[in-house]
Amino acid sequence: MMLELAGIIKEFDQGNGKKAVILQDVSLQINDQEVVGILGPSGCGKTTLLRIIAGLDQPTEGEVLLDGEAVSRPGARMGMIFQEHALLPWRSVLDNVSLGLEIQQMPRKDREEKAMRYLELVGLQESAHSRPYELSGGMRQRAAVARALVLEPSLLLMDEPFSALDPQTRKQIQEDIIRIQETAAKAIVFVTHSVEEAIFLADRLVILSAKPGRVQEILEVKLERPRDRMSPQFLEMRESVLGLLGGG
Amino acid sequence: MILVWQALALYVHNPFVLPTLDAILSVLLKPTADLLGSGSLLENARVSLVRVSLGFLIAAFLAVPLGVAMGRWEVFRDISEGLISALRPVPPLAWVPLAMAWLKIGLASVVFIIALGAFFPILLSTAQGVRGVKKSWQEAVSMMGAGEAHLISKVILPGSAPEIWTGMRVGFGIAWMCVVAAEMLPGTSSGLGYLIMYAYGWGQIQVVVAGMVAIGLLGILIDRFFIVVERRWFSWRAYER
C-alpha cells in the first residue's frame, strides 16, 4: 500500500463571491503499515484533509493516489472511523459490522463468522446482539473499529475517533489500536487534537498550520513501543510539539 | 357522557332524534344481522375496509418512491414541490365530481378519493424522513463501497422508516375519513358510509349511531395497530437525533 497526496488545494465558496482557502498545497506520502498522525490548531483543515483522502470530499486541485490510482469517491479499500461512531441504530452490533460484507454479497453464515472474528479482536463478542445505543461510548467506537477492519482495508482513517471518550477508556482503546495495527498490519492516518495521543500512536507526525492549512512540519517519532507516556523522551517530544503548535 | 345520553334519550322519547342506548347496543351486538336489506354491519365494514386498504396501498406504492426521490434528489424536489403545493390544499372530497367524471360512479372513483387523501401525508413525511437521515450513516456505508442502490436500501429506507410509518398512520386516518364520506355520495350501495346514510333515510337513527360507533372503533383499532408496530420496530428512534 502506498498513499500519495499531490498538491492538494481545497477552497470553499463563502457565498459572497470570495473563496476561503482551507488547504494550501498539501503534499504527503504515506507508506505501507505506517501510522501517521495529523495535528494542528482548529480550523487548519485537518478533518477536511482526511475526508479528501477518504474520497468523501473532492479537492479543488491536486490528487490523492492510492497505489498509483486516483481516489475520486469513497470505497472499501480504505476504512474510516468517524468522530461520532455512525453505527446504524436499527441494526445489531453484529449486523453493523457485517454490513460491508453484506454489500459485497457474502453469504450470511460466512459474513457473520467473519464479523464475529473482528468483534473478538476488539473485545466485543459478548455484545454482538446488542443494539449500538445499548453500548457505552467506548464500546461503540470499538464496534466502529471492527466495522472498518472487517473489509480488510489496507489503510485505516480515523477522525478524532476517541475525543468523546473519558481518559481511561481513551487510553485503553489507544493501546488496542496499537495491538490491532501490529496484528492486522494496516497503515493508519488519524487526526487528533491531543498531542499525547499523536505521539503515543504515530510513527510520523504531520503538523499543519492554520488558515490556510499547509504542512508546517513533519516529525518522526523514534520512541520505542510500547511507549511510556511518562518517560523523559516522551515528555520532551510533547513539549517540542506543543511549542510548534503554539508558534504556528 | 353515556349516562347523559341515555337520560336525554329517555326524556326526549323520540327514536327518530335520539335513540336509546339499548336500541343502539342491540344493533351493535348483532353485527351479522341484516339491516334494512342493505347488508349487515360486519359486511358493510368489510366493504369499507377493502376499499380503504386498496386506496391506501395505491397511495403508499406511489408516495414512498416519489417521497424518497424528492428527499434525495434536489432536481426532483424542485420540480415536484410546485405541483404539490398547488394540489395539496384541495381537500380530497373536492375531487369527487372530477373523479366521477373520469372514472364513473363506482369502486374506482371511491378508491381514487381515498388514495388521494392518503397520498400527501405519506409523500411529505417520506421526503422529510429521507432528508433527515444522518449524513454520517450514509458516509460510513459509502466507505464500505456501497453505491446509490445500496445506500437507499441499507441506509435511506431503514433510516427514514419511522417517518414513513408516521406518514402512513396519518394517511390511513385521512383515508378512513375519505372512505366513509365517499360512500355517502350517490352511486354507492354498500359500506359503512352508505349504511348510515341509508339508515338515516329510513329514520333508523339507532342504526346511524351504531354505524358511527363502528366507524370510530375501527379507526381507533387501526391507529392502535400503527402505534404498536411503531413501538416494536422503531424503538431505536428514541435514542437518535
Image: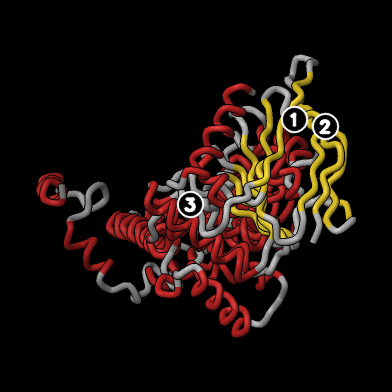
Amino acid of disc 2: Asp
Alpha-carbon span between mark 2 and mark 3: 49 Å
**Can the viewer see residue B179?**
no
Q: Residue at x 61, y 81 (%)?
A: A108
The front one of B77 and A12 is: A12
Q: Residue at x 79, y 28 (%)?
A: A24
Q: Circle 2 is placed at which residue position? A: A25
Residue A88, position as x, y percentages in the image = 53, 58
Q: Circle 1 is placed at which residue position? A: A214
Q: Residue at x 67, y 69 (%)?
A: A151
Asked if labels 3 and 1 share a chain, the reply is no
| Left or right: where A165 falls relative to A31 | left
Residue B151, position as x, y percentages in the image = 68, 58
Question: Which secondary structure, mark 3?
Answer: helix
Q: Tell me the crowding category of disc 2: few under 14, some 14 to 19, or many 20 or more residues within 10 angstroms, Cα based.
A: some
Task: Please tell me in which quadrant of the rendered image residue B75 appears.
Answer: top right
Which of labels 2 and 3 is toward the front?
A: 2
* Looking at the image, residue A37 lies above or below residue B230: above
Amino acid of disc 1: Arg
Circles 2 and 1, Cβ within 8 Å, touching? The answer is yes
Alpha-carbon span between mark 3 and mark 1: 49 Å
Q: Which chain is indicated by disc 1? A: A
Please give the label number shown on residue B166: 3
The front one of B45 and B69 is: B69
* Looking at the image, residue B69 lies above or below residue B151: above
> Going by the picture, which residue comes out furthest to the front?
A232
Asked if labels 2 and 3 share a chain, the reply is no
* Looking at the image, residue B89 lies above or below residue A225: above
Q: Which chain is indicated by disc 2? A: A
